[in-house]
């Protein structure tokens, strides 16, 4: 399951993130979501805690809007939940 979640998160397209952002009514702006997508797909080890597959706040706060930190966590949790329950 871990490998499936990691692979899915690393391969998410920007359009998929936008769709999930809208579906979950998180209201993360497009430019902020682009930065998050870049970090997620290109800087995985800096962004994610490998043992728990959770976001590292220090990395997020350096590159992303601080206002959205909880929204990024909610987005990742939603994605993991969808993968676990095979809804993606």
Image (tube, grey):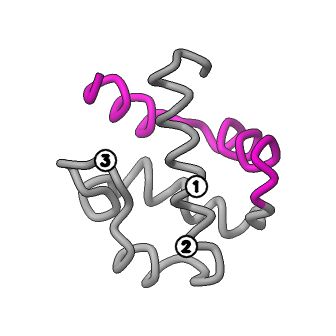
Q: CA distance from mark 1 to mark 2?
A: 9 Å
Q: Which quadrant of the view contains residue 26?
A: bottom right
Q: Which quadrant of the view contains residue 68?
A: bottom right
Location of residue 23 in the rendering, given as x and y in whole percent from the top left corner: 80, 41
Tell me the residue that label 3 is attached to.
Answer: 53
Looking at the rendered structure, which numbered label has been put on residue 19? none
Q: Quadrant of the N terminus?
A: top left
Sequence-first disc among 3 and 1: 3
Q: How many C-alpha atoms fall within 10 Å of the one at disc 2: few (<14), some, or many (≥20)?
A: some
Q: Which of 24 and 66 lies nearest the eye of the viewer?
A: 24
Tell me the residue that label 2 is attached to.
Answer: 69
Q: How many C-alpha atoms fall within 10 Å of the one at disc 1: few (<14), some, or many (≥20)?
A: some
Residue at 61 percent across and 18 percent down: it is: 87
Give the answer, above or below, for where 27 lies relative to 5. below
| Residue 16 belongs to magenta span | yes
Looking at the rendered structure, which numbered label has been put on residue 74? 1
Residue at 34 percent across and 62 percent down: it is: 47
Q: CA distance from mark 3 to mark 2?
A: 16 Å
Q: CA distance from mark 3 to mark 1?
A: 13 Å
Which residue is the extreme one toward the top? 86
The span picked out in magenta is 1-26
Sequence-first disc among 3 and 2: 3
Sequence-first disc among 1 and 2: 2
Location of residue 63 in the rendering, given as x and y in whole percent from the top left corner: 48, 78
| Residue 73 belongs to magenta span | no
Location of residue 32 in the rendering, given as x and y in whole percent from the top left corner: 66, 69
């Amino acid at each position: 399951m871990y490998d499936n979640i990691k692979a899915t998160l690393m391969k998410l397209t920007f359009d998929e993130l936008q769709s999930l952002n809208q579906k979950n009514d998180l209201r993360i702006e497009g430019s902020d979501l682009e930065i998050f997508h870049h970090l997620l797909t290109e800087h995985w080890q800096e962004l994610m805690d490998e043992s728990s597959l959770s976001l590292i706040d220090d990395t997020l706060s350096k590159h992303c809007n601080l206002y959205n930190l909880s929204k990024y966590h909610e987005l990742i949790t939603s994605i993991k939940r969808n993968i676990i329950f095979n809804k993606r």
